[in-house]
Each structure stands twice: as C-alpha cells, then as structure tokens.
Amino acid sequence: MSYRHTVNGTTYVFADLRSLLARASPLRSGDQLAGIAAASASERVAAQCALADLPLANFLTESVVPYENDDVTRLIIDSHSRSAFAPLAHLTVGGFRDFLLAAAPATLTALRPGITPEMSAAVSKICRLQDLIAIARNCHVRTAFRNTIGLPGRLSVRLQPNHPVDDPRGIAASTLDGLLLGAGDAVIGVNPATDSLDATATLLQLLDQIRSRYEIPTQTCVLAHVTTTLRCMERGAPVDLVFQSIGGTEATNRSFGVTLPLLAEAQAAALSLRRGTVGDNVMYFETGQGSALSANAHHGVDQQTIEARAYAVARAYAPLLVNSVVGFIGPEYLYNGKQITRAGLEDHFCGKLLGLPMGVDVCYTNHAEADQDDMDSLLTLLGAAGVTFVMGIPGADDIMLSYQSTSFHDALYVRNALKLRPAPEFEAWLARMGLDQPGASERIPVRMAPALAGLALASLA
C-alpha cells in the first residue's frame, strides 16, 4: 500500500509503510548511509504529515519486515493484545500523540500490550522533544531483584568499573569509588575485556564477594555473551543477571549469536537460581540505533523503528534493566550531539511506552561531533523524562571500551538538580554506611574504612 502527501504543490509518494516511516524520521546519518532517509526537509515534512494521518490499525495489517521471514515480527504480531488495543483502534498516529499527552499513568500501563513497537516508533517521529519527555515521564515501569527499580522520583545508576585487562584490583578500586559516590543501585556491571569463561567466573566471584561482604542491596553482572553466562551458571558461579545485546530483527540477533529460544533458556536458568530477594527480574539487555544496519540486517527499515522492535524482544523476557547505548556505535549512525540527543529521548520514550525499565547510556565516541556539554544536556532532559537509570563510569571515560559516557559525579548532579533519589533499599544502605551525609563523597565514612583493604583482599581471593 502506498502513501502520499502534497507540500507546496509537490506530491510525495511513499511506496509502503517501511518507506513512509524512514522518510518521516528526523535526520540521522545512519538512515542517510542506508539510502533510505528523506531527500529534503520538504519530503520529511510530507512523510510526517502522511504518517500523522495514518490509522494505527494499519500497523496490524502491514509489517515492515515480513512475518514469514522474521521471528521478531512473529513475536510482535503473535503477542499483540487486541483487547488492550481497543481504546486506540479508532485513532490515527496523530490522534495517538494527542491521546498520549493527556493520558494518566494508569491508562498508559493498561495500553502496553496493545502497542506495537512500530506504533511507538511512528508516534515518536511526529513528537517534539517536549512531547517525548512529557509522555515518557508518565510511563511508570517497576522491576525488582535485590532492590526496586523505576519508582517515580527515583534515578538508579549502573556502576560500570571496566578495566582494559580485567584486573580485579582495578575493578575493585573503581567499584569502591562508585559506591562512595552513591552509584550502583541499578547494577554493578562489568564489561569483560574478553569472553573467557574463566575470566568471567573470576569477575562474578569478585563482584559477589564485594556485594555480600558489605550487604549491598543491589545486583551484579558480568556482561559476557549469554552462552558464556550459561556455562558459568553450570559451574555454579554466582550469576544474578543474564546480560545480552539484542536487536530488532532475527538477522540482527543472529549476528549477536543469539536466538529467542536461547534467551528463554537463559532466563529460565537464572530464575532457577532464586538469587533475588525482592523480585525475580533476571535479564539485562542493551540495544542501540544502528546495530541492525551495521550487521546488514535492517531490511531497509530506518534505524529508529528497528531499535523500537528490539524492545519487543526485551519485554518478552521481563528484564530488570534495558538500556540504549545511544551514541556508542559512532557518527556513521548518529553524527552529532543533536542527533544523539534526539535518539536518546526517542529510545527512552519508545521503551517506556512499551513497558520497559528503560535506561540510557548517555555517550559518544571520540570521533563524533559531540562533547560533554551535549551529554550534560541529554542527561538533564532524560532526568526530567523519568529515565530509569544511567551509567556511572570513573571520570566519564571508559578506559576499556574507549568511549565517553557519564561519571559518578554526573549522576550525583542530576539527582541533586532534579530532586531524584536512589532505589529505596539502596538509599537505606547508603544511610547505614554514612554515605548520605553532606560531603560523604569527599571522605571515607567510618563504616566503610575497612573497605579499601577488604576490596583489595576480595580482588585477590
């Protein structure tokens, strides 16, 4: 089915839904690289106008990736709730935007099973930044493992103590640094420098020793490939969360070495360990606009719509955490700070609308046209939008992955500026340890004085 709209006497024709969504996307370098972006601002406006007039019901009869060729499309269609969609069935995409802006949090929660990723992507394309913020702020998504994530007025932080050679002492030192600055309630999560089974098991033991020794109400994770984590569980290693990067098409996931049944197997294995204390959300997923294109697995679909489809994969496994590593893939996909900012707010909006505990790694690579001022802006906007969690990295500079993100101090800034608090169980722990006092970040509280020696010993155990 083709779509058309006339702007200033010129009629633009869009061959199908896939083309319409691509041309309606705000400008980004990845869609230009793929050859699917609007050729002009006029064409983009025409596509956005045509998209605004499109009935939402059309998304249930026309797929951007064929049903018979893609298991993500089958997941989206087969899990869709017609009853949850009923209140929206009469709306166009433009009417959907108006509806969302007026909807109460309870209404947005009830609608989740009726919203497909393509619907969320479509409405995001006709939203201003303030719309993306206002709607996402009303999407409340609660998850739990050893603490409770996503409550209104809260902002969690992933403590990311990466090290270029997985040195346990370096990781332990960075972990202590983050804890002293109030980070770590989302997860203490290490990206391993290799996917070695032995190294992964060693890091899992280290993080678990730190957590248990100081009775920290949080969860730990080594972000190895899901197959490595499964083997660690078979060995009896202390696995809290199973991590995996995922994408919005079957071919993208295949490029990551995963399938939907494999993710289900990993979820079942982690649940069987029963390590959670206040909840049983055991999965952690990362995504990012451009991953499908970089794997030549995008089927001609724009990168933002493909990203939203990844969220359908994520929500099938009830994750504790999901985050878009928004600027990590590079300027080939998001060229500058403006594109990164828009993409981060879109990803957060779509994830929250679909019912995910959505975080964002506010980041950029060193060859992008972006800097920390851009990241300060996006971090602040995401805080206003109710982002579930952000990253905490020593000095905002990941020395293993070689990209720029947000620091422990950045997280403190946005919590203070917007009056946001950590997860409640973690907040109580900070108070017990004396880390909630003014100036606590500049000294080691009495109860944490043994921590330096303890962490050093744990790292060598």
Image (cartoon, helix red, strand yellow):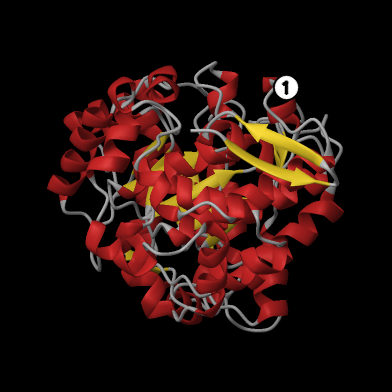
Residue pointed to by mark 1:
33
Q: Height in image: 320 above or below 381?
A: above
Pick whichever, 93 or 311, lies toward us.
93
The picture places residue 261, in percent across and down from the top left corner, at: 21, 29
**Res. 12 image quadrant:** top right
Pick whichever, 401 or 111, lies toward us.
111
| Disc 1 crowd, CA 10 A, few/some/many (<14, 14-19, 20+) | few
Q: Height in image: 108 above or below 174?
A: below
Q: Height in image: 437 above or below 66?
A: below
What residue sits 34% from the left and 51% below the top? Answer: 319
Q: Amino acid at mark 1?
A: Leu
User: As drawn, is 20 to the left or to the right of 199?
Assistant: right
Pick whichever, 330 or 313, lies toward us.
313
For the question of whether residue 428 can be seen, the reply is yes
Q: Height in image: 327 above or below 187?
A: above
The picture places residue 360, in percent across and down from the top left corner, at: 58, 52
